[in-house]
Amino acid sequence: MIENLNETLKETTYAGLARTFHRLGWCGFWTQVVVGAIPAVLMTYLFFFAGSPMGPRAGFRFVEFLTLASLAVLLFTTIWSFRYTRLAQRITTPEFRPTNDFLSRAAWTGIIASTTGVLISIVVMLVEVAHLLFYFLSVPQAGVPVIQTTNGNDSSWVSAVDMLSLMALTLTLFAEVIILVFSLWLLFRVTIVASKSYEEATA
């Protein structure tokens, strides 16, 4: 693996850069499509088919908003990963080749978007886990029922539905971290090619 990495670093041509954009673009795109489909299905069930979607967290509209914002960022980074594949085609054509600054900005956009998604997911997960922890600590340590069998208050019980948003956020976080790594690698590759081009121009 180290040998493959060394060979990749030595490949400072635009053809090598195009292949990197193409491979990572498609890998990122399909990773987010597959992984992102799961939280999308879970959140659809959570908001439209569950009788009491938020369970004990009912009223946390800010959490719901951030959860939807996280999915929106995931959608954007999926589209941006597809854009990487289009840039790969342009890089291979000298007359349509973007400048190094343009490619750097494209990679930075992916970095900023994926970092935003990671931060949103972490904040929502911290809020929801902290709220659940507070609730579990406030009841007898023997446990709490997971099915409501009486006409009690919604805030007095926890069900499996309450874990759906956490699962969705965990999967979203996983996908965004992958895209963040891919975008950082693309930025690194663009920097290497730009440096090589500058050295050849000033030689």
Image (tube, grey):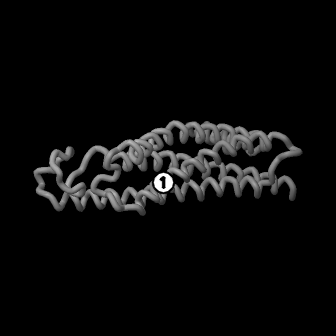
Name the one closer to the observer, 109 or 194.
Answer: 109
The count of marks equals: 1
Q: Residues within 10 Å of mark 1 (few under 14, many from 20)?
A: some
The location of residue 5, given as percent across then percent down, is 61, 41
Hey, which quadrant is residue 45 in on the image?
Answer: top left
The location of residue 130, given as percent across then percent down, is 30, 61
Quadrant (top left/top right/bottom left/bottom right) for the C terminus: bottom right
Q: Residue at x 77, y 43 (%)?
A: 13
Q: Is residue 139 left or right of residue 22?
A: left
Q: Residue at x 76, y 58 (%)?
A: 101
Residue that carries the numbered disc 1 in the rendered image: 68
Instruction: Mark yes or no: residue 124 visible.
Output: yes
Q: Is residue 28 left or right of residue 97?
A: left
Q: Residue at x 17, y 54 (%)?
A: 152
Name the one closer to the observer, 27 or 191.
Answer: 27
Quadrant (top left/top right/bottom left/bottom right) for the N terminus: top right
Name the one closer to the observer, 35 or 16.
Answer: 35
Q: Is residue 52 left or right of residue 199?
A: left
Name the one closer to the observer, 59 or 169.
Answer: 59
The location of residue 59, given as percent across then percent down, is 34, 61
The location of residue 126, given as percent across then percent down, is 36, 59
Q: Is residue 11 left or right of residue 201?
A: left
Where disc 1 sits, the SS reads helix
What kind of residue is marked 1? Leu
Instruction: Mark yes or no: residue 195 visible.
Output: no
Q: Residue at x 81, y 56 (%)?
A: 199
Residue 40 vertical placement versus 120 (above, below): above
